[in-house]
Amino acid sequence: MPENNIIPFHPQKPTVQSGTMETTTKTEVRDMNKDTYSKSEIDLKLQNLENKVDSQFTLLNERLESSTKHILSETKNMLNELQLAQYKERETERKATNKWFIGLLVTIGIALFKLFFP
């Protein structure tokens, strides 16, 4: 337990003045003034706290939005790369299919030529 939380206790004998007991001392009144705040001070502190919380939430919201935008742009880039790769693969397959088709036509043409012109 930290020592700064310890409150010194100095018992004093209460003084009796005109039939009533006086229990507070000047130091107690000064200490009490340190611990009390006016409504405007409390409102100001709460307003400052609210502003800090709002600014932190705003910052958090901006970070979330920027990370979301970053993730979306990365996803779009990946999809574009995938589409480009698929397009290149289809082009390669189309070229191979065309070569096979031309080869097959040439083979059929040669076979028909030999069949009709022996």
Image: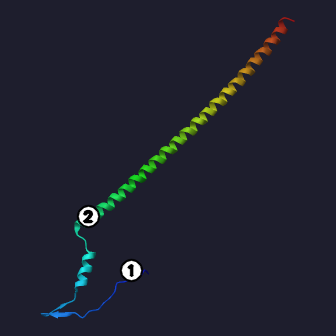
Q: Nearer the viewer, mark 2 or mark 1?
A: 1
Q: Position of residue 67 (x, y in %)?
A: 48, 48
Q: Amino acid at mark 2?
A: Asp
Residue drawn at (66%, 26%), measured in percent from left and top? 91
Decide: is 86 above or below 109: below
Q: Residue furthest left?
A: 18
Q: Position of residue 25 (x, y in %)?
A: 22, 86
How has the structure been colored for display? rainbow
- Residue at image mark 2: 43
Kindly state the secondary structure of the residue where label 2 is placed: helix
**Mark toward the start of the polypeptide (2 vs 1):** 1
Which sits in the foreground, 101 or 99? Answer: 99
Q: Residue 54's mark?
A: none
**Horizontal side, residue 51 vs residue 69: left or right:** left
Distance between mark 2 and mark 1 Cα atoms = 28 Å
Mark 1 packing: few (<14 Cα in 10 Å), some, or many (20+)?
few
Q: Picture quarter containing residue 83?
A: top right
Kindly state the secondary structure of the residue where label 1 is placed: helix
Residue drawn at (39%, 56%), measured in percent from left and top? 56
Number of marks: 2
> In the rendered view of the protein, which quadrant contains the N terminus?
bottom left
Q: Amino acid at mark 1?
A: Asn
Q: Position of residue 65 (x, y in %)?
A: 44, 47
- Residue at image mark 1: 4
Q: Picture quarter containing residue 118?
A: top right
Decide: is 87 above or below 110: below
Mark 2 packing: few (<14 Cα in 10 Å), some, or many (20+)?
few
Which sits in the foreground, 108 or 69? Answer: 69
Q: Position of residue 2 (x, y in %)?
A: 42, 80
Q: Residue furthest top?
A: 117
Residue drawn at (65%, 29%), measured in percent from left and top? 88
